[in-house]
Image (spheres, rainbow, N blue to C red):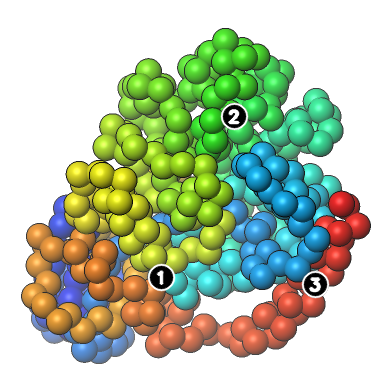
Amino acid sequence: MLILKNVTAIQFEPARVQFGVDIAIDGPLIKDVGAGLTAKYPQAQVREMDGKLVMPGIVCAHNHFYSGLARGIMANIKPCPDFVSTLRNLWWRLDRALDEESLYYSGLICSLEAIKSGCTAVIDHHASPNYIAGSLNTLRQGFLKAGLRGISCFETTHRNGGEAELKAGVDENVAFARLVDAAKASGDEPYLVEALIGAHAPFTISRAGMEMLADAVKTTGRGLHIHVAEDLYDVSHSHDVYGQDLIERLAGHELINDRTIVAHGLYLSDSDIGILNENDAFLVHNPRSNMNNHVGYNHKLDAYRNLALGTDGIGADMFEELKFAYFKHRDAGGSMWPDSFACFLWNGNALLERNFGARFGRLDAGFKADLTICSYDCPTPLAAQNIGGHLAFGMGSSAVDSVMVDGRMVYENRAFPFDVAPIYAEARKVAAALWKRMDELA
């Protein structure tokens, strides 16, 4: 047993601040929270925390680890006047250039940087059309090496190879779900990585592809993770080709349920939002990505029953993402205050609960010991009523001191338990080769 002694314990939902308490951790779970636990558990190992902030783990609810080696990219990228050209000229060339080595280093670097930013878990959405079979397990190895909790899936699409590519993508999703089930049953490794059934976006998935996805969801018991209405083109395509709204189309294939994750949703109709809400599904808002791609703003955030925050591949700094989400909302004339966005940040834990079958997101006995620990000198009083204000106007990822996942310190005193310098050095070499392959695909 480990006791984190003398912490400032913070919860986002329900909002709560406790000063000078101890947190007892037994294996992967929180056993007790309260004062004087060192006397109650005299055999426990004790770490003095000197009042550091300890909060339930932060979750990035939508990311793209395959993009980890794109930072500062020096490939020959044609002008991208609109969203679809950005996909074609940049991202769809990058994902086609990925091989096993570049994907491994991309995923591992992203896992390390997510942890440094305070994340205990990331929900990933993967694409590598020329390396499909086995790609999700390659990403899984990066999660396990870093000690990060995660959920991943393959981005099923027909954009490169028609129905054969659709089938290969679905097969990889199903194979990965079965691999996860087998690994969990064996107990040989920590149960840190789960599976969803992935799809790119409705405009790159035919009717046959939807049917394959529906069958995969049913046979694996997993939910769908998909981009929807990131741009108006997706909506127009669905109306033109299928005569339906986007979520209406997905629901017609029984793909909307309480494990469904819809990313973006900027242009969903009120009817579509109603379908998501009725089925207890989740929307993930990615404000920095939306701004970077100039696709517009989601003015209906307060209409969703379940809303979480993601980055869509722009790192995993969720402190920064919350700030952008809040300030962009206010700039657009929105009425919500920081406490709402603190709840959206916390909601990633609800997604973990639905997929891992455990309790996340509270500092109470029986909940997973996934913790984000920060050194933050409050210049003003800290209370349950103003946690959101401290997140929006003060605390950032530079405050992250340590991260615990499943009861194990994976980052402590701003250091990993292994030397990461060789990993970064190799990643730089691999990134240069990846960019070269991108130019060969132009």
Q: For the residue labelled by badge 2, is the local secondary structure a helix, a strand or a loop? A: helix
Earlier along the polypeptide chain: callout 2 or callout 1? 1
On the picture, is 344 further left or further right than 242? Answer: left
Residue drawn at point x = 83 percent, y = 58 percent: 438
Q: Label 3 is placed on what type of residue? A: Ala
Residue 328, placed above or below residue 305: below
Res 239 visible: yes
Query: Is tag 3's residue or tag 1's residue first in the polypeptide sequence?
Result: 1
Residue 214: tell me if it is visible.
no
Question: Relative to residue 328, is residue 248 depicted above or below?
Answer: above
Residue on which the image places disc 2: 233
Point 8% across, 75% down: residue = 381
Viewer-nearest of discs 2 and 1: 2
Q: Which quarter of the figure has residue 427? A: bottom right
Q: Quadrant of residue 297?
A: top left
Label 1 crowd bin: few (<14), some (14–19), many (20+), radius 10 Å: many
Q: Amino acid at mark 1?
A: Gly
Residue where numbered disc 3 is placed: 432
Q: CA distance from mark 3 to mark 1?
A: 28 Å
Classify the position of the N terminus by image quarter: bottom left
Disc number for residue 118: 1
Please state if 65 lies on the left or on the right of 389 as rendered. Answer: right
Q: Considering depth in this image, is 186 or 324 the residue closer to the camera?
A: 324
